[in-house]
Every structure is written in C-alpha cells, then in structure tokens.
Image: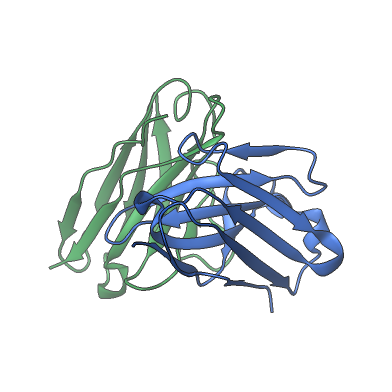
Amino acid sequence: EVQLVESGGGLVKPGGSLRLSCAASGFTFSSYSMNWVRQAPGKGLEWVSSISSSSSYIYYADSVKGRFTISRDNAKNSLYLQMNSLRAEDTAVYYCAREATAIGAYAFDIWGQGTMVTVSS
Amino acid sequence: QSALTQPASVSGSPGQSITISCTGTSSDVGGYNYVSWYQQHPGKAPKLMIYDVSNRPSGVSNRFSGSKSGNTASLTISGLQAEDEADYYCSSYTSSSTLRVFGTGTKVTVL
C-alpha cells in the first residue's frame, strides 16, 4: 500500500525549532519529488516547500523562506522539514504530499494524514 | 503570490450539477495547463480529484470534471451526492518563485 506517515509535530514556543519527518512506503521514494503543505486551523491549504527526487531543486513559499529547510534521505525513504524561528502563524497541520510524477502531472497524488504543529507560549 | 480565488460556498440538491470556479492570473492558471483540484472531508487529508485541468486519476468518479477558460478554471460535480459534501481546493503551478499556489477553498453543501 502506498503510504506517507508524518511525525514530529507538537507544541513549541515562539522562536523555537521543530523537525518534521515523513516516512514513505509502498513506492519507489527516490523517483518522486515531494512536498510539504500546511493548513492552519479552520483555514485553507498552503503549499510550503518542494524538493526534487535527487534534492537538486528546492523551493519554498515566501512565508517560510529563510526559516524552514526541506531535505530528504532516499536511503531511508524519508522526507524532512526543519522549522526554525517558529511563529504563531506557523501553527497548522503539516502534510507531506507526493508529486504526481507517474502521471506526469504538477499535482499532489498521495497525502499523509498530517501532523499538528502548535506555536504558542 | 496571492491565493487563487474561489467562492466560499456552493450548494445544490442531490442529483443536481454544481460548478466551482478558481480564478488566478496569466502567471498561474492562465499560463499553464497545470490546474488540479482536491476534495477534503472534515479532519481528513485532501484527495486529488482532477489534474492537468481536466484529467481524472484512476478511481475518481466520472461525475467530477474540470475545465479552463483564460485565467479561470472550473470543477463541475454532476449528479450531486451526499458524500460530495466537503471542502474543495484548486491549485496551480505558478511561474513565480513559489512554484505552487492553492485556491481559497470552497465548501460544498448538499441540501
């Protein structure tokens, strides 16, 4: 079964750091670009970051540029998001999502269940 | 990069058809055929319903269809069913440095 499982969320104080992980299974992880997408409570979806299959290309939303770092370990079938200088507005459910490479589309075809990050003092 | 504009809510009776619009600019929706649509039920992860403007992934009902005209994309749900009640989001590739943008989201209510 194709699956993405996020972990690492929790409560952190403003200015603090957190590292999210996403474990992939059921597909050849190293062949796919991966993304992080977040959703603040009661709000819409916001794309956060993208990384190509070999980590050659990395992109960030303006709202997190300079504070968040996306990375991956293809040997461990894992995606990461290092979040520094966290702000209250970073409070959200963070989803990892697979790029729909197999169908040649700019779309997210597989999503994890999400992990909640709460930034509060 | 601003979010794509969607109506906040759309409603319809069972069996009817509804259409959700998604308006962007020539830098995103209008410039590329890379519009996708996602369905999200409360407390659940989003699900891909349409990709590349009008293509359905395997397993998605043919009651869902997509189209685009200029800077506006649309998702049509025909034969509306109770299980279609959910939030729907469009997304597009964008030529800006941020690469991707989502719509503001539309709550679909089945009356």
Residue A19 percent coordinates (x, y): 61, 62
Which chain is tinted green? B
Query: What percent of the width, then of the height, locates residue B102?
Result: 42, 43
Residue closest to the far right: A75
Residue A21, quarter of picture: bottom right
Q: Which chain is blue?
A: A
On screen, residue A117 above or below B30: below
Residue A116 on image: x %, y %:
44, 68
Quadrant of the image occupied by residue B66: top left
| Residue at 49 percent of width and 38 percent of height | B92
Q: Quadrant of the N terminus of chain A?
A: bottom right
**Camera sees residue B62:** no
Picture residue at 40% right of the left edge, 50% below the top: A87
Which one is in front, A50 or B53?
A50
Residue A70, image x, y percentages? 66, 49
Instruction: State which quadrant residue B59 falls in.
Output: bottom right
Look at 41% across and 54% down and name the residue there: A14
